[in-house]
Amino acid sequence: MSEKRKKAGDDFYGTVTVGERGQIVIPAEARRAFDIETGEKLIVIGTPDKHHLMICKAEALHEFLEMMVDHLRRAESALAEDTELDSDNCENGGTRS
């Protein structure tokens, strides 16, 4: 493994202060680590309890969601196949192995 193993706290990039206009500055080290370029679109998402904010690249979120939808489709397909097998086994009086 050539990748350096991350330690707890390796992903802490400091604190930010909200300015008068509601702006924050993402620390340079974080921008470098996540390859965030000037003018790049970021998405800001909050949790329903209003305790957490997440900032992510729009493109990365889109790719992640596409991957999750693909996994969901595969899981639904596998569940449907399992349900069909269970139904066939019950109709034939057999048990599924």
Image (tube, rainbow, N blue to C red):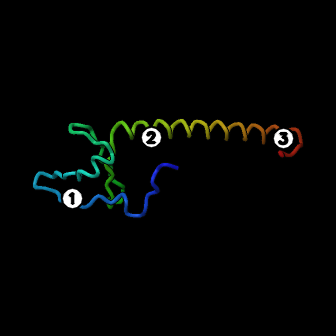
Position of residue 95 measured from the top left corner of the image (x, y, whole percent): 86, 46
Secondary structure under tag 1 reads loop
Relative to 60, 29 lies left or right: left
Query: Which residue does the numbered mark 3 point to in the structure image?
Result: 89
Of the image marks 1 and 3, the number of the one nearer the N terminus: 1
Mark 3: few/some/many CA within 10 Å (<14, 14-19, 20+): some
Q: Residue at x 33, y 60 (%)?
A: 12
Relative to 82, 56 lies left or right: left
Query: Which residue does the numbered mark 2 point to in the structure image?
Result: 64
Mark 1: few/some/many CA within 10 Å (<14, 14-19, 20+): few
Secondary structure under tag 2 reads helix
Mark 2: few/some/many CA within 10 Å (<14, 14-19, 20+): few
Residue 38 image-quadrant placement: top left
Q: Is there CB contact under 8 Å for labels 1 and 2?
A: no
Q: Is there CB contact under 8 Å for labels 1 and 3?
A: no
Q: Nearer the viewer, mark 1 or mark 3?
A: 1
Position of residue 20 measured from the top left corner of the image (x, y, whole percent): 10, 55
Instruction: Please tell me the numbered disc located at residue 16.
Output: 1
**Spatial CA span between label 2 and label 3:** 37 Å
Q: Residue at x 75, y 37 (%)?
A: 84
For the residue marked with disc 2, what is the amino acid? Phe
Q: Is there CB contact under 8 Å for labels 2 and 3?
A: no
For the residue marked with disc 1, what is the amino acid? Val
Question: In this picture, is 80 found above or below 28?
Answer: above
For the residue marked with disc 3, what is the amino acid? Asn
Position of residue 6 measured from the top left corner of the image (x, y, whole percent): 43, 58
Q: Residue at x 54, y 35 (%)?
A: 70
**Spatial CA span between label 1 and label 2:** 26 Å
Residue 8 image-quadrant placement: bottom left
Secondary structure under tag 3 reads helix
